[in-house]
Image (cartoon, helix red, strand yellow):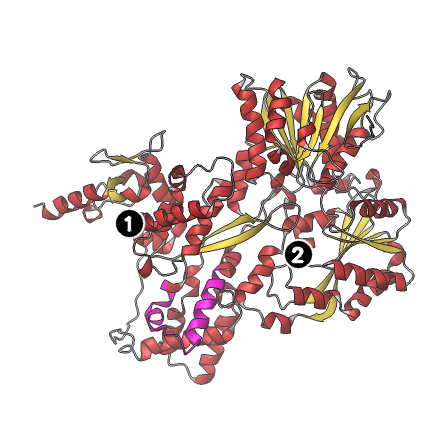
Amino acid sequence: MTTVQVTYAGLIKVTRGEAPKELYSHQNEAIKALNETNKNAFEGLLVLPTGGGKTLTAVHWLLRNFINNKKKVLWIAHRHELLDQALETLQLSAYSSLLSNVSGFRYRIISGHPKHDRPVNIEKTDDIIIASKDSLNSGFDRLLNNWICDLQEVLLVVDEAHHATAKTYRKVINAVKDNLKERGHDNGFKMLGLTATPFRTDESEKSLLKLVFPNDIIFSEHLRNLIARGILAEPIFENLKTKIEIKQKLNALNARQIKNIEDFDRLPKDIAEEIAQSIERNRQIVDHYIENRERYKPLLVFAINVIHAVALNKVFKDKGINSDFIVAAVNATDNKEKIQKFRNGELEVLINVEILTEGIDLPNVQTVFLTRPTASTILMTQMIGRALRGQRAGGTEKAYVVSFIDDWENKINWVNPEKLHFEEDAEFIVKGIPSSNRTARLISIEMIEEFARIMDNSIDTTGLEKLDFLKRIPIGIYHFSILEPSEGYEPNPRPYDVLLYDDTEEAYDNFVNDLKLLFQSIDLQHREILTEAELEKLWQTAKQIYFPDYQTLLGYRDEDVKNILRFYAQKEIPPAFLAFSERRKCDLCIVARHIYDNSLGRRAESDYINSIWNDEKSFGQVIFSYNQLYFMKQLDDEIRKITNPEIYGNVPISIPTVIPDTVPIEKLTLYEIKERDILEYRKIKNAVFAKHTDAKGFISCAISGVKSQMRRDFQIDHIKPMSEGGLTIVDNLQLLTRKSHVEKTRRENTRG
């Protein structure tokens, strides 16, 4: 039989002597923390900034504590480049100073890449398996039955652990953990997540990351400390404005298309091509490098797309600069050779498209050119991290991060690299969670479509226009992302928004809190994707139970309910709710009343309206998506409601001056609290439900004792009625079934 040698599996022999890469003090401190944690089963995170040596730290620790003690290690990641880097670090660390008890260890590297092995070839003799999570999901039985099944203890390492909230990751994690537990090895499962960016794009995924790694952060080091010690370079941020105006292209896009640019972090094809093929812009980039060549080289450029990389490379070469480009879509061997040339100094400039963000080690980078904008805090952190190797780490004392800024008229919320880098605890804070302004921007997308319908004379929106303006402003929003299939190596997250109004908030709140119960009707198992039949069944059930009067509910959409169901199928947690706490600042009724009551002249009225429009605290521009025409139309409508009340069904009255009293919030009804502070309302509501819910998830009626697991079956009631001085506090609130509530109310009304 003819045999050949392969590099995806084999034996790494231990070399006598000290490992050549000496760890820094923060890495040794990390290992001490890991040693202490390792006394028991654990599931936690090692968080080091990009360039802080998290892969080397983990490899040193696992070689000494697991491989050296003949214990097995499973290392998983989502990209084949990360797998290659892990294997290379293992090979370069196989010295007797770490491995005194073994002469060698067997490895196998598995992924869908043609140069890697397949799960079917897993052998019991493999000491460490380095694999992509997708390949393991397709070869699960082989992993469990031919490797995990005989183990009493295993270390699972999750590289770039901020991706581990995906259900496919959790499937691997839970299968390994459950297998050990079923065989009586409860303390045999140990999991270490590695990340420089332990944050995701919304609050729900932050909480899910805590569920995946319940021991939270085992050790972390701050970026500034590594800079002070010379391990990371001191970043110098420079901005260069280009002469490219995107104004005309942006004006051709509607608000939702602009939002999609932020959400997907991808430019529309025509805008990307215009920027990429701009001769003037590309020449400006190259000329700026040449003017600063001595302090900038070697240079790593992040380009917009392949067209841009090719165009930039040509301009660099035409100017006599030794440059080349790499892209994810071409032959991996070619990319590897070019990266090695850049490391060796044979290339002065390396241009790349979406490949040198995670994991690849390039200590010689002096400067990073950000010629592409990004709305992703994770991507920005990784891009600037490429230049941050300090002198003690074989890099530089200072590093330059140069942003080329096009004129977007502030319509897109691009990440500012300097602000991100220097913000307090930037790399340890969950970024991307919408602030009040961000929440307002999300809400404005739906609002602007409503305003556009009102502006269209061919559409009858009389009923909508008669509503008080504030009633048409959502009280909050569900903001979440769903992994959608893509052409890339892994699915891409696509963000979705569901707006909640006064009329729909309670229905949606009951719906999302009952999702676990609803999903008991289908056999989803480890799948993340609902079949069309399953989605249809769940949607019809939810619609019938929670939204029976959907035709009269402001803002109800079937797609919103379906998207929440799809999200739950992937994440198994309710979506995050973001309250629009600044809602009352958007009330144009107040603006209209001020204009009317003060009989403002044309000039005074114009000045007042402009001051409202330009007031950043009013959220006016954000809600109207920076379209002043829509703002003026809505304000005119509110003024007409006052001047011509008979048209809108209002009673003409003269409003005297009123100075309202101040009362404690607990003297308000639940509905009034909801109107003023949706977060406080939900806090009270959740506390009351928690008080009446047992360990098995059954909710009980305080009067009849009837039990159910569905929130919609109960109503909140004041034990001591408000008419008798009862307060809206948790101790005075109880849950009743609708029947019991009606009966109690009837008795109270017929007393005395």
What span is in magenta?
443-471
Secondary structure at numbered mark 2: loop
Q: Is residue 305 magenta?
A: no
- x and y percent of residue 502 in the render? 35, 57
Residue, disc 1: 667
Please tell me which residue lies in front, 73 or 538.
538
Q: Which residue is mark 2?
A: 374
Residue shown at 28%/77% (left/top)?
A: 645
Write down the quadrant of residue 590 in the picture: bottom left
Q: Could you say which quadrant of the image residue 558 lies in?
A: bottom left
Residue 108 location (% of width, % of height) = 73, 29
Q: Tag 1 or tag 2, which sits nearer the N-term?
A: 2
- 656, 173: nearer the viewer: 173
Q: Is residue 733 above or below residue 291?
A: above
Mark 2 surroundings within 10 Å by alpha-carbon count, few (fewer than 14), some (14 through 19), many (20 or more): many
Q: Residue 116: x, y in percent?
A: 74, 36
> Do the residues under discs 2 and 1 have CB atoms within 8 angstroms?
no
Residue 638 lies, in percent from the top left, at: 37, 74
For the N terminus, the quadrant is top right
